[in-house]
Image (tube, rainbow, N blue to C red):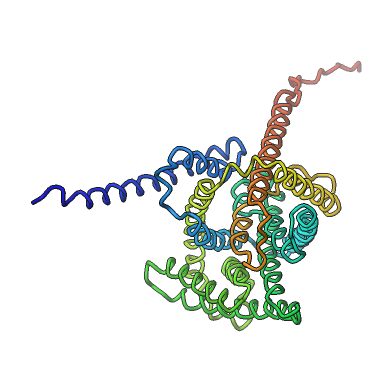
Amino acid sequence: MDIFSTLPFLVGAASTYALIIAASAVIIISFVFGEVAKKTSIPSVLMLIILGIVANIALADKLDGFDFNSILPILGTVGLIMIVLEAALELELKREKLLPIAKSMLIAFIGLIASAWAAAMILQHFVPGMTSVSAWLYATTLSILSSAIIIPSVGGLRPDKKEFHIYESTFSDIMGIMLFYYLAGQLEAQEGTHGSGEFFFNIFLTIIISLIISYLIVLIFQNIKSHVKLFLLIAVLLLFYSLGKLQHLSSLLMILIFGLLIANMKLFFFGPLKKYLNYKEAHHIYEGLHVITMETAFVIRTFFFVIFGITIVLSSLANMEVALISGLIILSIYAIRYIILRFFIGSDILPQLFIAPRGLITILLFYAIPKEAEIAGFEPGILLYTIIGTSLIMTAAMIYDKNRGGKAVKTAESSPVGYRRWEAPSVVPTEE
């Protein structure tokens, strides 16, 4: 047998094992980054992007053959589904939670619209050839909070602040995506006729279909005895999400409604529906799905941000006009956020004011901008500056808040409550 005839196989096998080793190493490093993030308050996502940049510099020749830009939308879409599902599974719809949920939703909505308007004005003024609709599309991508960065980063905050950020970032994701596709639909509509009516009918139809599908999934899957039903359930959700997108429905709303329903089954299965629910079996599905969703979101988020780091063109950061536009957009983000939080929350707005990073959805929607709305003068560096800038500001705010909390604890410990030794009361004899 000619030994040279086996060389292609050996090379292929070596590259296969190299990819497995690289993927395994990235997941292990991501786990370490997560533990570092808990200790330092530096978002693990930021460390993953830096890891991708370093990998691109160190392995530039070896990475030339990979088309990472085609992988990012797939990873981003699946990651987005897992992140929203993970957030929905943690939302408890109790009477006492209604006010925090409503307040978070309103803050997310006003923040999204106001930030998009400000960014659109800036882009129209500075970017040559930028039309109104295109400016709003680009601005919307830059105005959505990143739940992929926020949710893993706020675990150490006070419970009410952590809850606020989970609600706000989740609603920002969903409403931002809905706004983006509404604007894209307006672009495609003939002179914009009936665009708004169709959009709101689309939302209403999505809610009805989502509720029906969610009830059916719970009722069917609670009776499946197989041990592999959880990944089957995820496959069903991905299928319905994709079919919904093809029918121009707000598919992310489907994922949110399903997550809310299975996390709050006793609330949704009321009256006659209650007798059809096997709560014990359905709750087992919820617990397993929660674990798998967290694990899957972690893996997909890891590879998404590492690959994004690899695709970053660092030379785009050297453009001073790009830096100026990005700086103005970032400034507008925090100015608007300050006004909104002061109005709705009051003076206790730290570190919430600075927890407004852009990330996964910003990147994902940037790749989804319709061809007819793309502007040649728009520099992707604006996207990069905004993502990195808001992440660094969040990092500084989280570190400051952690140090402030640590100092308060040390101050309390250094000034213990005083005590006095107990003495028996003296008895003064009385004269008889």
Residue 199 coordinates in the image, percent (x, y):
71, 77
Q: Is residue 79 left or right of residue 346?
A: left
Q: Nearer the viewer, residue 3 or 225?
A: 3
331 to 120, vertically: above or below? above
Residue occupying the point 65% across, 81% down: 205
How many numbered markers are drawn? 0
220 to 170, vertically: above or below? below
Q: Nearer the viewer, residue 357 or 171?
A: 357
Residue 308 coordinates in the image, percent (x, y):
53, 50
267 to 17, vertically: above or below? below
Corner quadrant of residue 373: bottom right
| Res. 214 in view | no
Residue 346 coordinates in the image, percent (x, y):
85, 48
Residue 87 coordinates in the image, percent (x, y):
60, 59
25 to 341, vertically: above or below? above
Q: Residue furthest right?
A: 432
Q: Nearer the viewer, residue 339 or 284?
A: 339
Quarter occupied by the C terminus: top right
Residue occupying the point 41% across, 43% down: 61
| Res. 67 in view | yes
Residue occupying the point 76% across, 19% down: 423
Q: Is residue 193 left or right of residue 312?
A: right
Residue occupying the point 70% across, 71% down: 182
Q: Residue furthest left?
A: 1
